[in-house]
Image (tube, rainbow, N blue to C red):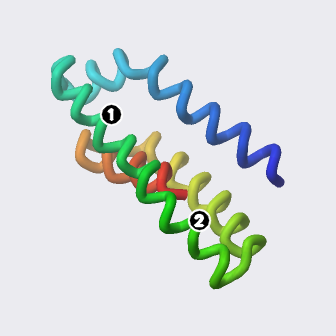
Amino acid sequence: MIISGAFFEGFDDAVINIALPYIMQDFGITTQRSGYVLSIIAIGTMVAFFVSRMADIIGRRKVFLTSVYMFSIFSLLTAFAPNVEVFIFLQFAARIF
């Protein structure tokens, strides 16, 4: 389970950079706005600190499994984002987990 979590986290980080030109085209955003989008998404990684701190309270196994499931769900839902705002929210939430 740990390997799958690490694999998908690394894959998600890499694929957004590869797919960025297509995302910009689909949502009709400029290069400058895409930088803002990536910055907001990256803030989700900083919020993840608070989720990881919950492991001491709730339990490491429970927090880890929930994080893997939630990360997978939010990453999947990103593929169906109808606009850039939903895309930002879903990727932000995925990075939290």
**Mark 1, secondary structure of its residue:** helix
Q: Position of residue 85 (x, y in %)?
A: 23, 46
Q: Which one is nearer the viewer's eye here, 37 or 58?
A: 58
Q: Which callout, 2 or 1, points at the residue further toward the start of the chain?
A: 1
Which residue is rendered at x = 70% and y = 64% of the image?
Answer: 64
Q: Where is residue 2 drawn, in percent x and y?
A: 80, 51
Q: CA distance from mark 2 to mark 1?
A: 22 Å
Q: Exactly how many numbered labels are in the figure? A: 2
Q: Position of residue 34 (x, y in %)?
A: 25, 26
Query: How would you rate the neighbour count of disc 2 (Cα within 10 Å): few for under 14, some for 14-19, many for 20 or more?
Result: some
Kindly report which numbered mark, 2 or 1, lies closer to the viewer in this rendering. Answer: 2
Q: Nearer the viewer, residue 89 or 59?
A: 59
Q: Residue type at mark 2? A: Ser
Q: Position of residue 63 (x, y in %)?
A: 66, 71
- Name the quadrant containing residue 81: top left
Residue 19 image label: none
What number is the disc on residue 38?
A: 1
Foreground residue, 21 or 5?
A: 5
Question: Residue at position x 33%, y 33% from top?
Answer: 38
Name which residue type carries label 1.
Answer: Leu
Q: Give the vertical position of 19 relative to 95 (above or below).
A: above
Residue drawn at (27%, 22%) of the image: 24
Which residue is under mark 2? Answer: 52
Work out which quarter of the rendered image holds the C terminus and state it: bottom right
Left or right, 60 with reference to 14:
right
